[in-house]
Structures are given as structure tokens and as C-alpha cells.
């Protein structure tokens, strides 16, 4: 597809469970970002990948959150021991990277609900 | 500490009217200021962006006005249409530095027919 895709679109889980959220960036985009958007709020930065490496993970709220991008394309956000406060829409975005300009293209998000 | 402050939280405008959303920032290192439009159930989509070396940028019905000395910028939507009803976010970034795009809290715009 032409845009950023995210799966699943919705995820309902129980407190304490482990979840994985997937992001497929736009082909050729070297930079990938994860954001979290709570109800009625703007997106909040979590982590930024340039290629395969996490260039900035300062937005991850705690060590229950982890993200990988092993081949420099698809990324997975992993949340361990989920808590009700983790409920939010998790957005992924991609861009051409620092040398390609600042425009970010967002996916539709994964709505995570922790019961 | 909120780095980008956005107002109003919500806005109701009649069709054909002008919608104005304001943002203010503190970090003078910011050098790229985009506006995003978000419809329910969708991700934010880049609408228009400006750099601080210009005071205004216009694309169709959408205009950004930028006041560097006041550290403020605003989005003007001319001839507002019901299809413009969405949530609008201002944002800011330091290019070549931190790649964190910092967002305002959003403005829910409703354009009545």
C-alpha cells in the first residue's frame, strides 16, 4: 500500500497480558516513529528509529515498553504486563529521515484497550 | 511541561466563516511548525507547515501566520466547510536535532452547515 499501515486496528487485552503492535512504514522511509494518543490529547512521542536502531527512546514511559525494527522496515511495539493506564491509540509514523525533510506520515493507529 | 500550547480547545464556526486556531511555544530551537488534521478513527495528516524564516504561508483555504518574536503561530481556515470538521493539532520540531515532533493538545473544529 501507499501509506503507513498498522495492525491490529483494535486490540482488547486483560491487565497483566503481553501485547505486540505492528507498523509497516511507507516503502523507502528510513525513519519510523511511535506515538501514543490518549483520549482528547495530542500524540505523545515514544520512540524514534533511524534504520534498525532506536535513535531516541526517551519517550517510552517505563521498561514495560519496548520496540524493535530488526530489518529497518517493519517495527513492533511490545508492551509487557499491560496496565489499564496503557489504554490509548498507538500511532506509527514514518519519514524519509533527517536528510529527507521533516514531514511525517501517520498510520491509522492501533486502539489498545486494557480491561 | 507542555512545550506547545494550543487554543481554543473547541471551536464552532458557520459554513463560509473563518476558523482561527492559535499556538504558542517556548523553545526557540524549534524551526519547523506543522499543522495536522485528524478525523475520527484516522491518524493525523499533515495539512500545512511553516519555517520561521517566513511570516505567512498559504495553501488553498489554509494559511499559517507566524510571529517569531512572540513565539506564536496560527492556522486560519478561510471559507470553512462542514468537511473541515476535524481535530487540528499544531506541532513543533527542531530539524537536525531531536526528532521528537511535539504536539499541542488539539482543537476540535465543528463547521455547521
Image (spheres, coloured by chain):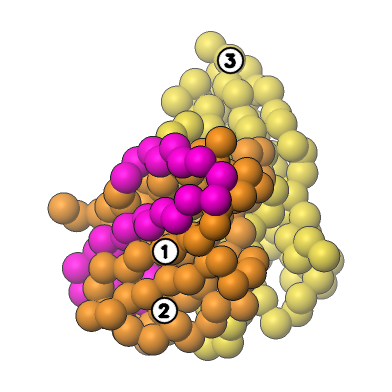
Chain colours: A orange, B yellow
Q: Residue at x 68, y 62 (%)?
A: B66
Residue at the disc numbered 3: B112
- Residue A68, can we see it? yes
Q: Quick one: label 3, few (<14), some, or many (20+) residues within 10 Å?
A: some
Image spot of residue B105 (x, y percent)? 69, 48
Residue A50 to residue B37: above or below? below
Residue B3 to residue B46: above or below? below
Q: Is tag 1's residue or tag 2's residue first in the polypeptide sequence?
A: 2
Q: Secondary structure at mark 1?
A: strand
Tell which tag, 1 or 3, sits nearer the viewer. Answer: 1
Q: Quick one: label 1, few (<14), some, or many (20+) residues within 10 Å?
A: some
Residue B110 to residue B69: above or below? above
Q: Quick one: label 2, few (<14), some, or many (20+) residues within 10 Å?
A: many
- Chain letter of the residue beneath label 3 in the structure image: B
Residue at the disc numbered 2: A49
Q: Residue at x 46, y 41 (%)?
A: A13
Q: Quadrant of residue B103?
A: bottom right
Image spot of residue A50 (x, y percent)? 38, 83
Residue A12 is covered by the magenta coloring? yes
Viewer-closest of A12 and A2: A12
> On the same chain: label 3 and label 2?
no
| CB under 8 Å between discs 1 and 2 | no
> On the same chain: label 1 and label 2?
yes
Viewer-closest of A101 and A39: A39
Q: Residue at x 31, y 51 (%)?
A: A6
The boundaries of the magenta stretch are: A8-33
Image spot of residue A73 (x, y percent)? 25, 73
Viewer-closest of A102 and B50: A102
Tell which tag, 1 or 2, sits nearer the viewer. Answer: 1
Residue at the disc numbered 1: A77
Cα distance, mark 3 to mark 2? 41 Å
> On the same chain: label 1 and label 3?
no
Amino acid at each position: 500500500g501507499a501509506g503507513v499501515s498498522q495492525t491490529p486496528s483494535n486490540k482488547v487485552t486483560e491487565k497483566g497480558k503481553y501485547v505486540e503492535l505492528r507498523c509497516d512504514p511507507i516503502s523507502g522511509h528510513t525513519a519510523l516513529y511511535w506515538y501514543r494518543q490518549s483520549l482528547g490529547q495530542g500524540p505523545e512521542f515514544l520512540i524514534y528509529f533511524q534504520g534498525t536502531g532506536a535513535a531516541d527512546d526517551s519517550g517510552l514511559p517505563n521498561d514495560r515498553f519496548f520496540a524493535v525494527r530488526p530489518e529497518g522496515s517493519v517495527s513492533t511495539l511490545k508492551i509487557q504486563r499491560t496496565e489499564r493506564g496503557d489504554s490509548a491509540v498507538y500511532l506509527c509514523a514514518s519519514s524519509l529521515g533527517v536528510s529527507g525533510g521533516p514531514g511525517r506520515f501517520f498510520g491509522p493507529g492501533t486502539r489498545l484497550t486494557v480491561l | 511541561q507542555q512545550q506547545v500550547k494550543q487554543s481554543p480547545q473547541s471551536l464552532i464556526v458557520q459554513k463560509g466563516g473563518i476558523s482561527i486556531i492559535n499556538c504558542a511555544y517556548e523553545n526557540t530551537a524549534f524551526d519547523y511548525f506543522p499543522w495536522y488534521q485528524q478525523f475520527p478513527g484516522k491518524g493525523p495528516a499533515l495539512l500545512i507547515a511553516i519555517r520561521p524564516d517566513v511570516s505567512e504561508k498559504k495553501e488553498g483555504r489554509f494559511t499559517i501566520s507566524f510571529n517569531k518574536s512572540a513565539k506564536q503561530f496560527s492556522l486560519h481556515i478561510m471559507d470553512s466547510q462542514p468537511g473541515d470538521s476535524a481535530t487540528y493539532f499544531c506541532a513543533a520540531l527542531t530539524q537536525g536535532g531531536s526528532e521528537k515532533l511535539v504536539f499541542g493538545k488539539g482543537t476540535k473544529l465543528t463547521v455547521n452547515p
